Amino acid sequence: GEDVEQSLFLSVREGDSSVINCTYTDSSSTYLYWYKQEPGAGLQLLTYIFSNMDMKQDQRLTVLLNKKDKHLSLRIADTQTGDSAIYFCAERLNTGTASKLTFGTGTRLQVTL
Amino acid sequence: DAGVIQSPRHEVTEMGQEVTLRCKPISGHDYLFWYRQTMMRGLELLIYFNNNVPIDDSGMPEDRFSAKMPNASFSTLKIQPSEPRDSAVYFCASTFYSATNEKLFFGSGTQLSVL
């Protein structure tokens, strides 16, 4: 079945690292994504990882994928106030056609001074 | 490109009224998606189109909801009659399919309040 779970809230201090976690249940997922939603806006793609990779780094962002445990994480180094937002993980199934993404519940990241 | 454009940004209506939400996808994109976001249920896929044809409408909650895509540059989501439980943010998203990856581009959403 399709079910993507995240913790609802995370608070970190400015300058610290943030780690947002996600678990998914469908082992046939091909791509896993992280989207960011700022207040009053739509979701924006942050980064993604292909299912045959373990890690992907993109500037301050590091994505780790543990396929055995179906666990995905997003690490934000040197977290800034501008990183405050809701972060969604999403999985794309290997449907052979275009993306039908299943989104997680979203994690609200609060960055404090 | 201006991105995915949705209108209106906010809609307040009374129960029983018809509501029409509009979306203009990014030019050249061949897939269009309608999502609904609520606190209780998160982000739900309602329906999506490929080349203007509805592919999967299994997420449409009930017959009061309908969606059309008369051409590649325009789609509507209609609720008739509207009910208070339809209050949510409705997002439209579009993408160009790629076998290796594709990225969804979201509009800013329509905040719907049904009183």
Image (cartoon, rainbow, N blue to C red):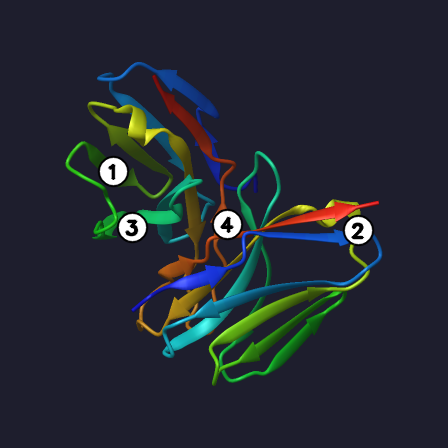
Question: Extreme top residue here?
Answer: B14
Query: Quick one: label 4 or label 3, which is nearer the N terminus?
Result: 3
Label 3 element class: strand
Reply above or below: A82 against B16.
below
Determine whether label 1 and label 3 are within 8 Å by CB.
Answer: yes
In the picture of the structure, the residue carrying the numbered disc 2 is A80
Separation (CA) of disc 2 from disc 4: 24 Å
Label 4 element class: strand
The amino acid type, in three-letter code, at marker 1 is: Ala
Residue B4 location (% of width, % of height)? 49, 40
Residue A91 location (% of width, % of height)? 44, 66
**Mark 2, mark 3: which one is toward the viewer?**
2
The amino acid type, in three-letter code, at marker 4 is: Phe
Q: Residue at x 47, y 45 (%)?
A: B26
Residue B49, disc = 3
Please give left or right for residue A73 compared with residue B91 in the image: right
Determine whether label 1 and label 4 are within 8 Å by CB.
Answer: no
The amino acid type, in three-letter code, at marker 2 is: Gln
**Mark 2, mark 4: which one is toward the viewer?**
2
Residue A61 location (% of width, % of height)? 71, 66
Determine whether label 1 and label 2 are within 8 Å by CB.
Answer: no
In the picture of the structure, the residue carrying the numbered disc 4 is B105
Separation (CA) of disc 4 from disc 3: 14 Å
Labels 2 and 3 in the same subunit: no
Q: Which residue is more in the foreground, B15 or B46?
A: B15
The quarter of the displayed image where residue A38 is located: top right
In the picture of the structure, the residue carrying the numbered disc 1 is B67
